[in-house]
Amino acid sequence: LFFEQLNRKQQVARAWEMASNMNTIQYYDNFLRNYPFSVHSDIAQEKRDELLEAKLWKTALRNNTVEDYLAYLNNAPLQDKADEAKENILNIESSEEATWADAIANDHPAFYLHYKTHFDNATKIELANQGIINYLKSPIDEDGQPIDLDDISEEDEEDMLFQDSIQFDTQTKYLTYQAFHQLQ
């Protein structure tokens, strides 16, 4: 029993020495997984958390994307830079280019309206207005997505309750648009 305990202590000491010398998240994770109740486990957890925090923050700064700052906020154990991450997210999202790119990519009145309420580029505001009008004028499919009028054949038109429902669907979209506008 004595030799088993001595052997176990030596294994823990070797594993701890290896983890602290390598000083990587992987080695600390391995140490914590294999020896969760050792005298070194608290220090191993602290070192691992510091390394993970630094890695996530470095990635967020390097890429400077909302996704990477959110990854930091969701996964960083210490949250040392949480306020700075949130500020950087707001700066990215409030840039005109990013807001316009979101509007174009999503092609939805909410995104166009968001652009219109925050920026004053006359050309893009006209395009945003046209995007809103096009969305509100078009009929919608069973999933609530707009259907391009050019994509509807005469057979489809006869099969759809298109004529009866277009007025209702357009009014519903218009009310959604107005509600969003009021909330903004």
Image: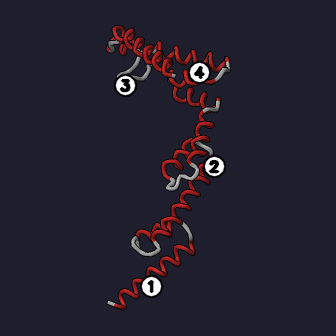
Front in this rendered view, residue 105 or 173:
173
| Label 2: how many Cα within 10 Å (few below 14, some 14–19, many 20+) | few
Q: Nearer the viewer, mark 3 or mark 4?
A: 4
Q: Are marks 3 and 1 in contact (CB under 8 Å)?
A: no
| Residue in front for this viewpoint, 80 or 181 | 80
Residue 150: x percent and y percent?
47, 15
Q: Amino acid at mark 4?
A: Thr
* Residue 7, picture quadrant: bottom left
Which residue is found at the position 50% from the left and 69% from the top? 43
Task: Please report the residue visible at 59 percent of the width from the left and 43 percent of the height from the top.
Answer: 65
Q: Are marks 3 and 4 in contact (CB under 8 Å)?
A: no
Q: Give the residue at x 59% y 34%.
A: 93
Q: Tell me the kind of residue under disc 2.
A: Leu
- Label for residue 10? 1
Foreground mark, 3 or 2, reads: 2
Label 1 – label 4 distance at C-alpha: 66 Å
| Quadrant of res 139 | top left
Q: Residue at x 32, y 89 (%)?
A: 1
Alpha carbon distance from label 3 to label 4? 28 Å
Res 149 seen here: no
Q: State the mark number for residue 179.
A: none
Q: Is residue 36 left or right of residue 109?
A: left
Query: Residue 172's x, y, as percent?
Result: 40, 14
Which sits earlier in the primary sequence, circle 3 or circle 2? 2
Few, some or many C-alpha atoms within 10 Å of disc 3 (few <14, some 14-19, many ≥20)? few
Q: Amino acid at mark 3?
A: Asp
Task: Say which mark, if any, is on residue 143.
Answer: 3
Q: Which residue lies under the disc numbered 4?
A: 117
